[in-house]
Image: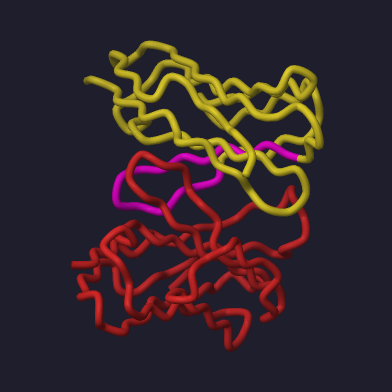
Amino acid sequence: ETGVTQTPRHLVMGMTNKKSLKCEQHLGHNAMYWYKQSAKKPLELMFVYNFKEQTENNSVPSRFSPECPNSSHLFLHLHTLQPEDSALYLCASSLFGTSGTDTQYFGPGTRLTVL
Amino acid sequence: ILNVEQSPQSLHVQEGDSTNFTCSFPSSNFYALHWYRWETAKSPEALFVMTLNGDEKKKGRISATLNTKEGYSYLYIKGSQPEDSATYLCAFTGANNLFFGTGTRLTVIP
């Protein structure tokens, strides 16, 4: 399997549930990203990991907790979410996380619905 | 948060027509401008990265130009085909992170 994969593709959860989103990249990249896309809004950066270290947290509420055990895997742990957190969550990777010219390669996203 | 604007928001063209759309971004602290193509239910796919004022990039029937002094980029599609139907995103970076526009949704009618 190549590229960036995300599981699950769709997730419905209640506000009291705990769930995790998984992202895996097979490109040998060193940087990984979580983005959120809400309806009618641009893609919004949430977290950046570079060589497994978190280098960016874009003022994301603590109910979203990222984890990057190695350069190929990225998780987003979710707990006590709100209905307004319903959105498409995209993962991306790039060779390095410190260059603005680096192309980011995206997964297909997880469509999250919070009831 | 930087303001990246794309216009129009959506566009319908007939197969065979050529079309273009615009991305506007801050002209200060410019580093790079990215274009992505995003088909429904698929991953956004990188088209171009441009860094220099006056840059022109081409990939098949799709091309892009860049004006960093006035803060805009144009994406052109020549002889649109139904498979070009997608949302086209631009993203600006001043250093590291990408700031995306909301995209232009293109529908090519057979």
Percent from the top left, x then y, of residue B90?
A: 56, 36
Question: Image height check: is B91 above or below A53?
Answer: above
Name the residue nearer the viewer: A16 or A46. A16
Residue B102 percent location from the top left of the image: 45, 36
- The x, y position of residue A28, in whole percent, is 64, 73
Secondary structure that dominates the magenta span: strand
What range of the chain is rendered magenta? B32-46
Residue A53: image quadrant is bottom right
Q: Colour of chain A?
A: red
Vertical placement of residue A86 versus B108, above or below = below
| Residue B108 image-quadrant placement | top left
* Image point (37%, 11%), residue name: B17
Instruction: Give residue B53's quadrant in the image.
Output: top right
**Residue depicted at x 78% and y 40%:** B31
- Looking at the rendered image, the quarter that the N terminus of chain B falls into is top right
Query: Magenta stretch: residue B44 in it?
Result: yes
Q: In the rendered image of this protein, which colour is used for chain B?
A: yellow
Residue B89, above or below B24: below
Q: Quadrant of the C terminus of chain B?
A: top left
Nearer to the camera, B67 or B80 = B67
**Which coloring applies here?**
by chain
Q: Is residue B1 left or right of residue B94?
A: left
> How many numbered discs?
0
Task: Identify the residue at horizontal 35%, vertical 43% (top origin).
Answer: B39
Which of the pair A112/B58 is nearer the observer?
A112
Instruction: Report if residue B61 lies within the magenta region.
Output: no
